[in-house]
Image (cartoon, rainbow, N blue to C red):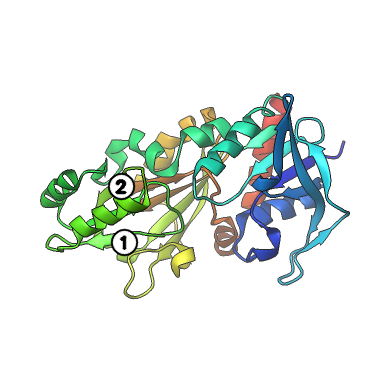
Amino acid sequence: MTLRVAVQMDPIESINIAGDSSFALMLEAHARGARLFHYHPDDLSAESGRVRARARAIRPINQAGAHFEWLGAPETIDLADDTDVVLMRQDPPFDMGYITATHLLEQVQGQTLVVNDPAEVRNAPEKLFVLRFPDLMPPTLVTRSLDEAMAFRARHGAIVVKPLYGNAGAAVFLIDKTDGNLPALVELFGHVWREPFMVQAFLPDVARGDKRIVLVDGEPAGAINRLPKSGEIRSNLAAGGQAEPTALTPREQEICARLGPELKRRGLIFVGIDVIAGYLTEINVTSPTGIRAIDRFNGTDTPARIWDAIAARLAAR
Protein backbone atom coordinates (compact mmCIF):
# COMPACT_ATOMS: atom_id res chain seq x y z
CA MET A 1 0.00 0.00 0.00
CA THR A 2 1.30 3.48 -0.88
CA LEU A 3 2.34 5.51 2.14
CA ARG A 4 0.56 8.88 2.28
CA VAL A 5 2.66 11.68 3.79
CA ALA A 6 1.58 15.26 4.48
CA VAL A 7 4.36 17.77 5.15
CA GLN A 8 3.42 20.80 7.22
CA MET A 9 6.15 23.33 6.52
CA ASP A 10 7.01 26.82 5.37
CA PRO A 11 6.46 27.67 1.69
CA ILE A 12 8.49 25.24 -0.38
CA GLU A 13 9.14 27.87 -3.02
CA SER A 14 11.54 29.75 -0.72
CA ILE A 15 13.66 26.94 0.76
CA ASN A 16 17.36 26.35 0.11
CA ILE A 17 17.44 22.68 -0.80
CA ALA A 18 21.19 22.38 -0.19
CA GLY A 19 20.63 22.63 3.55
CA ASP A 20 16.92 21.99 4.09
CA SER A 21 16.23 18.94 6.25
CA SER A 22 12.50 18.89 5.46
CA PHE A 23 13.31 18.66 1.77
CA ALA A 24 15.73 15.80 2.44
CA LEU A 25 12.96 13.92 4.23
CA MET A 26 10.62 14.54 1.30
CA LEU A 27 13.18 13.20 -1.18
CA GLU A 28 13.60 10.00 0.83
CA ALA A 29 9.85 9.52 1.19
CA HIS A 30 9.43 9.98 -2.55
CA ALA A 31 12.23 7.47 -3.23
CA ARG A 32 10.31 4.96 -1.11
CA GLY A 33 7.21 5.43 -3.22
CA ALA A 34 5.21 7.65 -0.87
CA ARG A 35 2.51 10.03 -2.08
CA LEU A 36 3.41 13.47 -0.74
CA PHE A 37 1.25 16.47 0.13
CA HIS A 38 2.52 19.92 1.07
CA TYR A 39 0.66 22.49 3.16
CA HIS A 40 1.33 25.47 5.41
CA PRO A 41 0.12 25.66 9.05
CA ASP A 42 -2.26 28.45 7.99
CA ASP A 43 -4.02 25.85 5.81
CA LEU A 44 -5.23 23.83 8.83
CA SER A 45 -8.92 23.76 9.82
CA ALA A 46 -10.84 21.83 12.45
CA GLU A 47 -14.58 21.11 12.55
CA SER A 48 -16.73 18.54 14.32
CA GLY A 49 -13.75 16.58 15.56
CA ARG A 50 -12.06 16.42 12.15
CA VAL A 51 -8.83 18.18 11.19
CA ARG A 52 -8.37 19.17 7.56
CA ALA A 53 -5.66 20.81 5.51
CA ARG A 54 -5.84 22.59 2.19
CA ALA A 55 -2.93 20.75 0.62
CA ARG A 56 -1.37 20.02 -2.71
CA ALA A 57 0.22 16.83 -4.00
CA ILE A 58 3.88 17.38 -4.78
CA ARG A 59 6.94 15.68 -6.23
CA PRO A 60 10.30 16.84 -4.82
CA ILE A 61 13.17 17.16 -7.31
CA ASN A 62 16.78 17.38 -6.16
CA GLN A 63 17.61 20.28 -8.47
CA ALA A 64 18.22 23.83 -7.25
CA GLY A 65 15.85 26.32 -8.80
CA ALA A 66 13.44 23.63 -10.01
CA HIS A 67 13.10 21.55 -6.86
CA PHE A 68 9.44 20.56 -6.94
CA GLU A 69 6.50 19.84 -9.19
CA TRP A 70 2.86 20.26 -8.20
CA LEU A 71 0.82 17.18 -9.08
CA GLY A 72 -2.58 18.78 -9.30
CA ALA A 73 -4.67 21.59 -7.89
CA PRO A 74 -5.04 22.31 -4.16
CA GLU A 75 -7.42 19.94 -2.42
CA THR A 76 -8.81 19.50 1.06
CA ILE A 77 -7.52 16.40 2.83
CA ASP A 78 -8.61 14.88 6.12
CA LEU A 79 -5.44 14.36 8.11
CA ALA A 80 -6.85 11.32 9.92
CA ASP A 81 -8.37 9.53 6.92
CA ASP A 82 -6.22 10.64 3.98
CA THR A 83 -2.70 10.47 5.43
CA ASP A 84 -0.56 7.92 7.26
CA VAL A 85 2.18 10.31 8.41
CA VAL A 86 2.26 14.06 9.04
CA LEU A 87 5.68 15.69 9.27
CA MET A 88 5.35 18.81 11.41
CA ARG A 89 8.26 20.79 10.00
CA GLN A 90 7.45 24.49 10.06
CA ASP A 91 10.20 26.68 11.48
CA PRO A 92 9.78 28.57 14.76
CA PRO A 93 9.07 31.08 16.31
CA PHE A 94 7.42 28.90 18.90
CA ASP A 95 4.45 31.22 19.39
CA MET A 96 0.71 30.75 19.94
CA GLY A 97 0.29 29.94 16.24
CA TYR A 98 2.80 27.12 16.61
CA ILE A 99 1.17 25.89 19.82
CA THR A 100 -2.27 25.96 18.19
CA ALA A 101 -0.97 23.77 15.36
CA THR A 102 0.26 21.21 17.91
CA HIS A 103 -3.20 21.08 19.49
CA LEU A 104 -4.86 20.52 16.12
CA LEU A 105 -2.43 17.81 15.07
CA GLU A 106 -2.75 16.12 18.46
CA GLN A 107 -6.36 15.36 17.52
CA VAL A 108 -5.25 13.09 14.65
CA GLN A 109 -2.31 11.43 16.42
CA GLY A 110 -4.44 8.39 17.27
CA GLN A 111 -5.05 7.61 13.58
CA THR A 112 -2.07 9.27 11.84
CA LEU A 113 1.53 9.28 13.04
CA VAL A 114 2.62 12.89 13.57
CA VAL A 115 6.40 13.42 13.65
CA ASN A 116 7.48 14.74 16.04
CA ASP A 117 4.68 13.95 18.51
CA PRO A 118 2.78 17.27 18.69
CA ALA A 119 1.97 17.13 22.40
CA GLU A 120 5.61 16.47 23.22
CA VAL A 121 6.79 19.24 20.89
CA ARG A 122 4.49 21.57 22.82
CA ASN A 123 5.82 20.27 26.15
CA ALA A 124 9.50 20.48 25.18
CA PRO A 125 10.37 23.97 23.90
CA GLU A 126 14.06 24.06 23.08
CA LYS A 127 15.33 26.32 25.84
CA LEU A 128 13.01 25.01 28.58
CA PHE A 129 13.16 21.25 28.04
CA VAL A 130 16.94 21.44 28.41
CA LEU A 131 16.51 22.74 31.97
CA ARG A 132 15.60 19.19 33.01
CA PHE A 133 19.28 18.30 32.62
CA PRO A 134 21.06 20.99 34.69
CA ASP A 135 24.18 18.91 35.26
CA LEU A 136 24.77 18.78 31.49
CA MET A 137 24.34 22.53 30.97
CA PRO A 138 26.50 25.62 31.53
CA PRO A 139 25.33 27.89 34.37
CA THR A 140 21.90 29.10 33.23
CA LEU A 141 19.25 31.51 34.51
CA VAL A 142 15.68 32.05 33.26
CA THR A 143 14.21 35.30 34.56
CA ARG A 144 12.61 38.67 33.85
CA SER A 145 14.44 40.32 36.73
CA LEU A 146 17.30 42.75 36.19
CA ASP A 147 18.51 42.15 39.75
CA GLU A 148 18.72 38.39 39.08
CA ALA A 149 20.56 38.96 35.80
CA MET A 150 23.03 41.37 37.46
CA ALA A 151 23.70 38.94 40.31
CA PHE A 152 24.18 36.07 37.84
CA ARG A 153 26.73 38.12 35.88
CA ALA A 154 28.53 39.04 39.10
CA ARG A 155 28.92 35.30 39.82
CA HIS A 156 29.86 34.12 36.32
CA GLY A 157 31.42 37.04 34.43
CA ALA A 158 30.54 37.50 30.76
CA ILE A 159 27.06 36.27 29.86
CA VAL A 160 24.91 35.55 26.83
CA VAL A 161 21.32 36.86 26.89
CA LYS A 162 18.70 35.47 24.49
CA PRO A 163 14.92 35.16 24.16
CA LEU A 164 13.35 31.90 25.29
CA TYR A 165 11.48 31.34 22.04
CA GLY A 166 13.88 32.76 19.48
CA ASN A 167 15.51 30.75 16.72
CA ALA A 168 18.32 30.85 14.16
CA GLY A 169 20.51 32.94 16.49
CA ALA A 170 18.19 35.94 16.45
CA ALA A 171 18.50 38.46 19.32
CA VAL A 172 21.45 36.72 21.01
CA PHE A 173 23.68 39.19 22.89
CA LEU A 174 27.08 38.86 24.55
CA ILE A 175 27.39 41.11 27.60
CA ASP A 176 30.79 41.17 29.31
CA LYS A 177 31.28 41.60 33.03
CA THR A 178 31.62 45.41 32.87
CA ASP A 179 29.18 46.19 30.05
CA GLY A 180 26.77 48.94 31.13
CA ASN A 181 24.15 47.91 28.57
CA LEU A 182 22.68 45.03 30.58
CA PRO A 183 19.94 47.17 32.24
CA ALA A 184 18.89 48.62 28.88
CA LEU A 185 18.91 45.18 27.28
CA VAL A 186 16.73 43.71 30.02
CA GLU A 187 14.36 46.66 29.60
CA LEU A 188 14.25 46.05 25.84
CA PHE A 189 13.54 42.34 26.28
CA GLY A 190 10.74 43.22 28.67
CA HIS A 191 9.12 45.48 26.08
CA VAL A 192 9.47 43.05 23.16
CA TRP A 193 8.63 39.74 24.87
CA ARG A 194 6.20 38.91 27.66
CA GLU A 195 8.12 35.74 28.54
CA PRO A 196 11.25 35.52 30.68
CA PHE A 197 14.59 35.46 28.89
CA MET A 198 17.56 33.14 29.22
CA VAL A 199 20.97 34.11 30.60
CA GLN A 200 23.92 31.74 30.28
CA ALA A 201 27.55 31.96 31.30
CA PHE A 202 29.57 32.78 28.18
CA LEU A 203 31.63 29.85 26.91
CA PRO A 204 34.72 31.28 25.14
CA ASP A 205 35.23 27.94 23.39
CA VAL A 206 32.30 28.81 21.15
CA ALA A 207 35.01 30.25 18.89
CA ARG A 208 36.02 26.62 18.25
CA GLY A 209 32.48 25.77 17.26
CA ASP A 210 29.01 24.78 18.40
CA LYS A 211 28.16 21.16 17.65
CA ARG A 212 24.77 20.22 16.25
CA ILE A 213 24.19 16.53 17.03
CA VAL A 214 21.21 14.79 15.45
CA LEU A 215 19.46 11.98 17.30
CA VAL A 216 17.06 9.63 15.53
CA ASP A 217 14.60 7.91 17.87
CA GLY A 218 17.01 8.50 20.73
CA GLU A 219 20.21 7.35 18.98
CA PRO A 220 22.97 9.68 17.73
CA ALA A 221 23.07 9.73 13.92
CA GLY A 222 25.87 12.23 13.31
CA ALA A 223 27.06 15.76 13.99
CA ILE A 224 28.50 18.88 12.45
CA ASN A 225 30.63 21.56 14.05
CA ARG A 226 29.33 25.06 13.32
CA LEU A 227 31.98 27.78 13.38
CA PRO A 228 30.98 31.43 13.92
CA LYS A 229 32.18 33.89 11.33
CA SER A 230 34.80 36.43 12.31
CA GLY A 231 33.57 38.91 14.91
CA GLU A 232 30.50 36.80 15.80
CA ILE A 233 29.57 34.60 18.76
CA ARG A 234 26.62 33.03 16.93
CA SER A 235 27.51 29.88 15.06
CA ASN A 236 24.04 29.20 13.61
CA LEU A 237 24.25 28.51 9.89
CA ALA A 238 21.38 30.97 9.40
CA ALA A 239 23.57 33.65 11.04
CA GLY A 240 26.53 33.02 8.75
CA GLY A 241 28.21 30.14 10.59
CA GLN A 242 30.21 27.56 8.63
CA ALA A 243 29.82 23.81 9.01
CA GLU A 244 32.73 21.41 9.27
CA PRO A 245 32.92 17.65 9.87
CA THR A 246 33.33 16.38 13.39
CA ALA A 247 33.09 13.28 15.57
CA LEU A 248 31.46 12.84 18.97
CA THR A 249 33.64 13.11 22.05
CA PRO A 250 33.09 10.77 25.02
CA ARG A 251 31.35 13.64 26.83
CA GLU A 252 28.99 14.18 23.89
CA GLN A 253 28.27 10.45 23.74
CA GLU A 254 27.43 10.63 27.45
CA ILE A 255 25.00 13.50 26.79
CA CYS A 256 23.29 11.52 24.02
CA ALA A 257 23.03 8.46 26.24
CA ARG A 258 21.35 10.54 28.94
CA LEU A 259 18.86 12.18 26.58
CA GLY A 260 18.13 9.30 24.23
CA PRO A 261 15.69 7.21 26.29
CA GLU A 262 13.61 10.26 27.22
CA LEU A 263 13.44 11.46 23.62
CA LYS A 264 12.37 8.02 22.43
CA ARG A 265 9.75 7.73 25.18
CA ARG A 266 8.24 11.06 24.15
CA GLY A 267 7.97 10.17 20.46
CA LEU A 268 10.57 12.78 19.49
CA ILE A 269 11.99 10.90 16.52
CA PHE A 270 14.08 13.67 14.92
CA VAL A 271 15.93 15.89 17.39
CA GLY A 272 18.93 18.20 17.14
CA ILE A 273 20.91 19.08 20.25
CA ASP A 274 23.49 21.86 20.56
CA VAL A 275 26.68 21.34 22.54
CA ILE A 276 29.46 23.86 23.22
CA ALA A 277 32.67 22.74 24.92
CA GLY A 278 30.94 19.69 26.37
CA TYR A 279 27.92 21.63 27.66
CA LEU A 280 24.38 21.03 26.42
CA THR A 281 22.77 24.35 25.48
CA GLU A 282 19.57 23.47 23.57
CA ILE A 283 17.36 20.51 22.61
CA ASN A 284 15.67 21.29 19.28
CA VAL A 285 12.46 19.36 18.66
CA THR A 286 10.36 21.72 16.53
CA SER A 287 12.10 21.69 13.15
CA PRO A 288 15.68 20.46 13.58
CA THR A 289 18.17 20.99 10.77
CA GLY A 290 21.66 19.84 9.85
CA ILE A 291 21.15 16.42 8.28
CA ARG A 292 22.15 17.42 4.74
CA ALA A 293 25.51 18.77 5.95
CA ILE A 294 26.05 15.73 8.20
CA ASP A 295 25.42 13.37 5.30
CA ARG A 296 27.66 15.34 2.93
CA PHE A 297 30.57 15.12 5.36
CA ASN A 298 30.04 11.57 6.59
CA GLY A 299 28.61 9.76 3.58
CA THR A 300 25.63 8.74 5.73
CA ASP A 301 21.92 8.71 4.96
CA THR A 302 20.14 10.29 7.90
CA PRO A 303 16.77 10.70 6.10
CA ALA A 304 16.74 6.94 5.54
CA ARG A 305 17.36 6.38 9.27
CA ILE A 306 14.53 8.73 10.14
CA TRP A 307 12.12 7.00 7.74
CA ASP A 308 13.20 3.60 9.07
CA ALA A 309 12.30 4.83 12.57
CA ILE A 310 8.96 6.13 11.31
CA ALA A 311 8.26 2.80 9.59
CA ALA A 312 9.02 0.96 12.84
CA ARG A 313 6.60 3.21 14.73
CA LEU A 314 3.90 2.63 12.12
CA ALA A 315 4.40 -1.14 12.28
CA ALA A 316 4.06 -1.07 16.07
CA ARG A 317 0.75 0.84 16.07
* Residue 305 visible somewhere in the drawing: yes
> Image quadrant of residue 82?
top right
Residue 198 is labelled as 2
Residue 46: where, in percent of width, then height? Answer: 71, 32
Q: Secondary structure at mark 2?
A: strand
> In front: mark 2 or mark 1?
2
Mark 2 vs mark 1, CA separation in Å = 17 Å
From the viewer's side, name the closer residue of 269 and 194. 194
- Of callouts 2 and 1, which one flags the residue occurring earlier in the amino acid sequence? 2
In the rendered image of this protein, does residue 79 appear above or below residue 296? above
Residue 173 screen position, x and y as percent = 30, 61
Nearest the viewer among 23 and 54 is 54
Give the amino acid type for the residue marked by disc 1 in the picture: Val
Give the residue number, with chain letter if any, for mark 1: 206
Q: How many marks?
A: 2
Which amino acid type is marked by label 2? Answer: Met
**Quarter that holds the C terminus:** top right
